[in-house]
Amino acid sequence: MTSIPSAASPPTTTERKWAEAEEFENRFATEQLDISTRLEKLTASLQETASGSELAERTKELHQIATQCESAQDLLNRYTNSLPPFQVRHAQEFLSSSRMRLTHLSALLQPKQRFRFRSRARTPPVSSAESVAAVAAAVAAETKIGCSANTHTEPLPAPVLTVGSSVAPSPSQAGSGVWQDLSDCEISISGSLTTSDRIQDLSLHRLERVRFTYLLQSTVVRITHARHCTIVLAPVTSSVFVDHCEECIFYVASHQVRIHNSVSCTFYTHAQSPPIIEDCSSLRFAPYLCGSSFAERALQTLGWSEENQNWSKVVDFRWLKQGPSPNWIVLPPEERRPFDQ
């Protein structure tokens, strides 16, 4: 008589919640990347004059992104009971930030706003010294550097911006959290890690030979088309997306790090989940701390464990074979360099 095998024991509540949290992470990360990419493309398209049909297409795209955000919100709502609080908070911060960007883009698509944008007078050239002063003022206004008479917060240090001989950043870049088309310059912005006036989204696009140091908190950071740059960031509470970067050095700590289409870059990273790479080669990874006293204080401020070793557990979506991926290595300890703080 053949015995009937006993049924496998059902998963425990903890195991079920862990599996659901992992499933949510994978699904939401895909939605997050797609929404971020579509918002960036739509934002870039608004820099160009549009015909009536093109304007209709942009408006349609805006509505589709809004619908996708609602779908992502529904996804979050379904999994909320299985997720740890920090994961719910990070997802909600991203969705709130995306809705704010949609509201801004919707205003730009209105006829009155579009007319103003197209007819804006061209800013006359200014000297590097004038640019530095203007940017410092804009950053101070945006991040409320200093303290008002009604608060007891310690004044934040004034930002230090040293511009090289090529392209100086404009005040509008400093105020919006978007820095783009820069070369041969050094930008350093510092302040209190506990300030509530952080920029939700920080975007860096088309940078070359730039040292960019941003020591204020942000929620989401996007870095695209950077070459020969050093980028130092205070811990990012949600995600860092890196795309089409070459021969750069990054110091990043966040809940999630995703890297696409990049080559010959070094990442000093601390991630709450393993970094994800796709279509990359010759990447090197090392711990975010790396002897830096600032990095240690920053992680302690957020309550993130310094013992986290996810930086060395990189997941390569393009390497499905058994064995280690050839597209990344652990940077040897003797080659690691902490950023100067």
Image: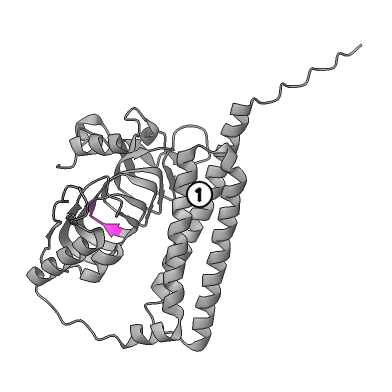
Residue 139: percent from left, percent from top: 21, 62
Q: Residue furthest top?
A: 1
Residue 181: percent from left, percent from top: 26, 68
The residue closer to the viewer here, 198 or 252, is: 198
Magenta run includes residue 227: yes
Question: The N terminus is located in which quarter?
Answer: top right
The residue under the point 48% across, 39% down is: 85
Check the image and tell me how it is coloured: one colour
Pointer 1 local density, CA inside 10 Å: few below 14, some 14–19, many at least 20: some
Q: Is residue 220 left or right of residue 294?
A: right
193 lies above or below 159: above
The residue under the point 77% across, 21% down is: 7
323 lies above or below 79: above
Q: In the image, which residues are magenta?
A: 226-232
Which residue in the structure is indicated by mark 1? 29
Q: Would you identify the image quadrant in which residue 143 lies?
A: bottom left
Residue 218: percent from left, percent from top: 33, 52
Q: Is residue 156 left or right of residue 277?
A: left
Magenta run includes residue 139: no
The residue under the point 73% across, 22% down is: 8
Is residue 223 visible in the rendered image? The answer is no
* Residue type for callout 1: Ala
Q: Would you identify the image quadrant in which residue 150 lies?
A: bottom left
Question: The C terminus is located in which quarter?
Answer: top left
Residue 11: percent from left, percent from top: 66, 26
**Disc 1 secondary structure class:** helix
The residue closer to the viewer here, 340 or 335, is: 340
Is residue 24 visible in the rendered image? The answer is yes
The mark total stands at: 1
209 lies above or below 300: below
Q: Residue furthest right?
A: 1
Report the predominant secondary structure element of the magenta stretch.
strand
